[in-house]
Amino acid sequence: MLLIAAFTIPLKIMREPKEEYLEPSVLVYKTPEGPSVDNVSNVWEKVKDRNETKFVTSENNPSALIYIHPYSVGAFDPKTAEIIIILSSSSEGSVKTAIFRLDFQTNQLKKAYTSNFSKIEKFTLENAAKLMEGKIAELAYGEKDIIKEEVEDLHPYFVYTYPAGDFGGTLIIEKRTGKLILYATTVWDGRGELLIPQDE
């Protein structure tokens, strides 16, 4: 008679520790010529579970900045406007960022970008104004003198908007990196464009 012995071998299942994601503090910004963000919670729902968001919120002190960018303001065109969400967080020597562009009318995601920058020691309002002046001259429509008091300090971001007499724009710097992470223009007649970040 054939005897078959059955053995149960205990298996130790190794589970990776569950990564924790932190809720960011949320700042809301309004450009002088654009509408207010009146549905912050609905907007955040669109991106909170995305991998780009987790890339940032897995680190310390995540912060979000939300605003509506009007690419055309002679007659505000909701079809061209975008909801912009900027996320950043810091670790010991670096800062992670994510930028989301959502359709203004539907809240649907159009494009997402992520970056990882080195952290710098100190970046002042004066530094921010100079960097913004240089980028306006380099990428847009001639020279512009920026008074540092016109730059808003929305920690950890420096934000500056210049109105569209003909051409205007909004620039945002992540102050812990000294990097200009967003520059989008606004025009009176026509449609502005996103200059930073650039689409690949």
Image (tube, grey):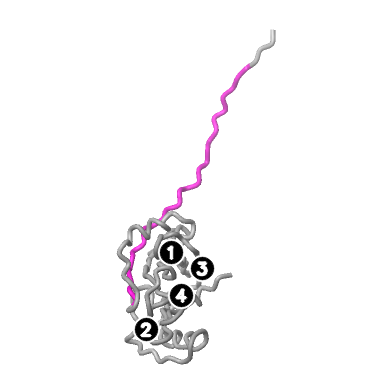
Quadrant containing the C terminus in the rendered view: bottom right
- Tell me what residue is drawn at x 41 percent, y 77 percent: 72
Q: Which residue is mark 3?
A: 115
Q: Which residue is mark 1?
A: 103
Magenta segment, principal secondary structure? loop
Q: Which residue is mark 2?
A: 163
Q: Secondary structure at mark 4?
A: strand
Quadrant containing the N terminus in the rendered view: top right
Residue 135 circle label: none
Q: Amino acid at mark 4?
A: Leu
Q: Earlier in the sequence, mark 3 or mark 4?
A: 3
Q: CB under 8 Å between callouts 3 and 4? A: no
Q: Amino acid at mark 2?
A: Pro
Figure quadrant of residue 102 = bottom left
- Tell me what residue is drawn at x 48 percent, y 69 percent: 94
Q: Earlier in the sequence, mark 1 or mark 2?
A: 1
Separation of residues labelled 4 and 1 (CA atoms) = 17 Å
Residue 47 location (% of width, % of height): 42, 58
> Tag 2: Cα neighbours inside 10 Å, few (<14), some, or many (≥20)?
some
Q: Which residue is mark 4?
A: 182
Q: CB under 8 Å between callouts 2 and 3? A: no
Q: Residue furthest top?
A: 1
Q: Secondary structure at mark 1?
A: strand
Q: Amino acid at mark 1?
A: Asp
Q: What segment is highlighted magenta in the picture?
A: 5-31
